[in-house]
Image (cartoon, rainbow, N blue to C red):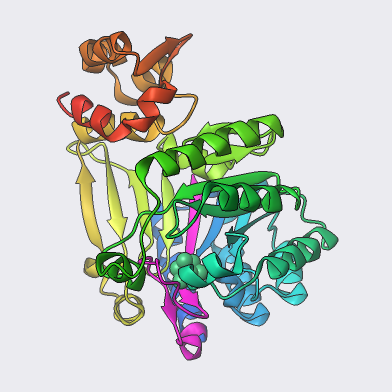
Amino acid sequence: MELYIHIPFCARKCRYCDFASYAGCESQMADYVDAVLNEASLRAKQLGNISFETVFIGGGTPSLLPASLLDKLLKGIREHFTIASHAEFTCEANPGTLTEEWLRVAIVHGMNRLSMGMQAYQPELLNTLGRIHTYEQVEQSVTMAKAQGISNISLDLMFGLPGQTLPQWQETLHAALALHPQHLSCYGLIPEEGTPLKQDLDTGKLSLPDEDAERAMYDETLHLLASQGYQQYEISNFALPGYACQHNLGYWQQVPYLGLGAAASSMLTGSITAAYTRETNPASLQDYMAMVSQNAWEMREVLPITRQEARFETMMLGLRTTQGVSETAFAAHHGCSLEECYGAQLRSLAQRGLMEHQGDSWRLTRRGMDVQNAILVELMDD
Ligand code: SF4
């Protein structure tokens, strides 16, 4: 089982961000940590003594949490749950907020992987995104983490940004590679409704690169990272051999997970009527903390996932990965074969060059990856 803990605090809201993260709420951090520990205590009673294979502290900006509160949180979590000795233990951090003290506390409690948002190299693009840091601060944070003994570092980058050119994206990739990360996540920008960035795009103040330019940036990513020894293991994720993110792989392979904190989701094994259930905590700080303090667990959204939906999720999540969907794993998970459920659709997609069958797995071709959404629509008719 996997553990996710959400830390919904940020120094400032980035202009593209629609995650559950809040700026200017530092005064609520201590109460929030208490709430997460109360939730952990309740879950521990409910689920028994679980040993987690992966831990991911995400946000928000976990590195904004004062070191003393991080210490309290991680100490408390270990009082309620076991974390496997070999567990991958990731903390997200943002350059400009990371300190040596914070790193030391995280490491003492088992953190062995650091994931940082770099996003772009050029100050003007960082400014468009509303990021609070410079590339130099990314560099300093990476150096600091390495000096503390962290040898598994991931950087997040974004392409398809307003005004971004292919040479600028190449420059960003080279600047990231110069820091020798073990892992890179390269996401295409998706402008989300209600964000200031989307507003600027809608009013014509900013404009996005066209589809061909964005595809050229993605192609450049595949080409350059492969030439530097990074293996693509998911549409947006690349790692040196042995450094693929186990937490994310588990998510794509539908390993059950427990999520603690505001907006966190849990996927727990199900009942006779549902393959599993997905439970999601309220996103707002106030609602989340009220739910915990008043024992009002009915405030969680509980969604039973039927067996048919679970099968479709296996396809949707598995086809994001370069490994694809394993026939053996599918049959073991769902009690029916991939052929029975999706045989006709898979063969039709293969004939059109959008999917391929290799060994035990079905996976998307490069052309298939470009039209992934349309493929998923075809697979919905299970
Ligand atoms: S740092 Fe991350 S979570 Fe926080 S506002 Fe920016 S994108 Fe959102």
Task: Report x, y in % for residue 178.
Answer: 76, 50
Left or right: residue 193 versus residue 16 is left
Instruction: Determine if residue 47 is in view.
Output: yes
Give the residue at x 36% y 68%. 197
Instruction: Determine if residue 52 is in view.
Output: no
Front residue of 323/230: it is: 230
- The image shows residue 259, relative to residue 282, as above or below, that is above
Task: Report x, y in % for residue 313.
Answer: 30, 35
Residue at the far bottom in the pictured view? 27
First to last magenta residue range: 1-29
- Does residue 28 show up magenta in the picture? yes
- Identify the image quadrant of residue 63: bottom right
Give the residue at x 47% y 49%. 187
Task: Report x, y in % for residue 287.
Answer: 29, 78
Where the C terminus falls, by quadrant? Answer: top left
Residue at the far left in the pictured view? 381
Task: Report x, y in % for residue 282.
Answer: 29, 69
- Identify the image quadrant of residue 205: bottom left
Give the residue at x 43% y 54%. 258
- The image shows residue 225, relative to residue 104, as above or below, that is above
Give the residue at x 48% y 38%. 216
- Identify the image quadrant of residue 315: top left
Front residue of 223/36: it is: 223
The image shows a total of numbered marks equal to: 0
Residue at the far right in the pictured view? 147
- Does residue 267 show up magenta in the picture? no
- The image shows residue 185, relative to residue 263, as above or below, that is above
